[in-house]
Amino acid sequence: MLKVTVIGSGNVAQHLIKVFLQTKEVSLVQAFARQPKSLIHLLPKEQITNDYNALQEVDVYIISVTDNAINEVSSQIPFKNKLVVHTSGTSSLEVLGSKNRKGVFYPLQTFSKSKEVDFSSIPLCLEAENEEDYKTLELLANSISNKVYNISSEQRKSLHVAAVFVSNFVNHMYVIGSEICATNNVPFEVLQPLIQEVANKINFLSPKEAQTGPALRNDTKTIEKHIEFLKDSNYQDIYKLLTQSIQNVAKEL
Amino acid sequence: MLKVTVIGSGNVAQHLIKVFLQTKEVSLVQAFARQPKSLIHLLPKEQITNDYNALQEVDVYIISVTDNAINEVSSQIPFKNKLVVHTSGTSSLEVLGSKNRKGVFYPLQTFSKSKEVDFSSIPLCLEAENEEDYKTLELLANSISNKVYNISSEQRKSLHVAAVFVSNFVNHMYVIGSEICATNNVPFEVLQPLIQEVANKINFLSPKEAQTGPALRNDTKTIEKHIEFLKDSNYQDIYKLLTQSIQNVAKEL
């Protein structure tokens, strides 16, 4: 049975605490929060601390705090040569203080406080300094997810940039679509099935195979109509740049 | 029982033929294809014609051909004052020839030949010149879909631009994400659950509420790291423009 302590009280920390509490192979020994109140709905107050010196010895300390605080928090852990990991997509392994063994336990998903998540389908990207620690993290990861990946700090850096494109920027496209609908009195729900199908399609086709639309067809007439339609909008530049980019990719094929 | 003839043999035409054949309330009388062979896997050859003069009288003629051909095809129908509709998101009602009554029957979805579609969840955007014709189209639409909308030519124009953002441009974000992964030896599948969740989220939240990421948080440090990471890439401009655009929208809130 793996003994684990979670340090942090944000979205990711809370989702990890919840899933560890439900996992037989894991014993969640403690959770650390600067404001213990913020976790009281999840576990008994005896298990919550805001005092680093009250931390008990466990197999893995999981630091799930804002990027800028990881280094400081890791240096406060009152042990040496223990396995200490963070959950960040952007921070390298080295951000962790040097007195303990370092690792990364990065769940690649978008978390909302209000929405339950099914951890079993969330990819966990693991990294460790040595094989034994990697195996410990793998054991922990496999106990909560079916999608476990060995991802180096370098790879994680690229993955985080890619994630911004496929999640934050995709959502911004939804924002633009919904604004265009609102301005023209069209219910945005008309676009919902299309949105679901576009995401669904790439379970079967590569994104390049799945590309469609006026830019790919080089349908100049439609593209010009759309650019004209957007002439007083903030989004004409985006339309032009993305149309050009789709055509550049098509040329490479 | 509504008598219908489909003119065209592309993706949309074929999906419409299939669903009408399965619908009790509809009698698919004929299908027109320049190459009758292209439809022979769908219906008996007696029902397929490539001769406009062989077209029988029906309640609705559905023209599902490339935008540029709609006018020409509509003028070839050897009847007067019949209901003739097209299935295009970009063409106006007026594109149809004037000797028949005009309408639009636009299924807003991305169609692939290889992939079956569930028509019942596809939004059908309808337009007609008079109420009686609208009712006929509504009857036809309700027989195959639960999502039927009255959308004017003006609204349809805006809807098509919005659809380019939420589908073609979204898919291009997936292309960029998959290229970044490939360049850095990360399996693209790691991003799949995130992609599905981002699309899923806007069933529960408005796109603006669902926005997350470094641009929204104004996390300058991460944004700079990402721009630096993309310095030799074709996608740095897109990263900058979309980051700026997310921040502009946030300022308006």
Image (cartoon, coloured by chain):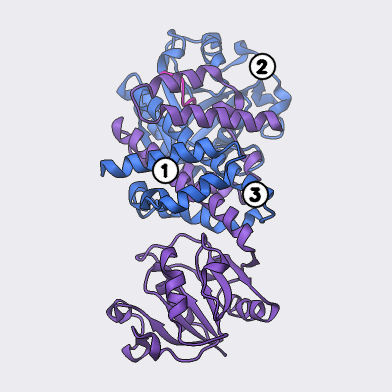
Chain colours: A blue, B purple
Marks 1/2: CA–CA distance: 45 Å
Q: Residues within 10 Å of mark 3 (few under 14, many from 20)?
A: few
Label 1 chain ID: B
Name above or below for residue B209 compared with residue B119: above
Q: Is residue B127 magenta?
A: no
Read off the residue under disc 2: A50
- Between disc 3 and disc 1, whose residue precedes? 1
Question: Residue farthest to the front?
Answer: B98
Q: Which residues are magenta?
A: A87-92
Marks 3/2: CA–CA distance: 35 Å
Picture residue at 46% right of the left edge, 49% below the top: A223
Read off the residue under disc 3: B204
Do callouts 3 and 2 mark residues in contact (Cβ within 8 Å)?
no
* Three-letter amino acid code at the position of disc 2: Asn
Read off the residue under disc 1: B172
Q: Position of B20 compared to A191: left or right?
A: left
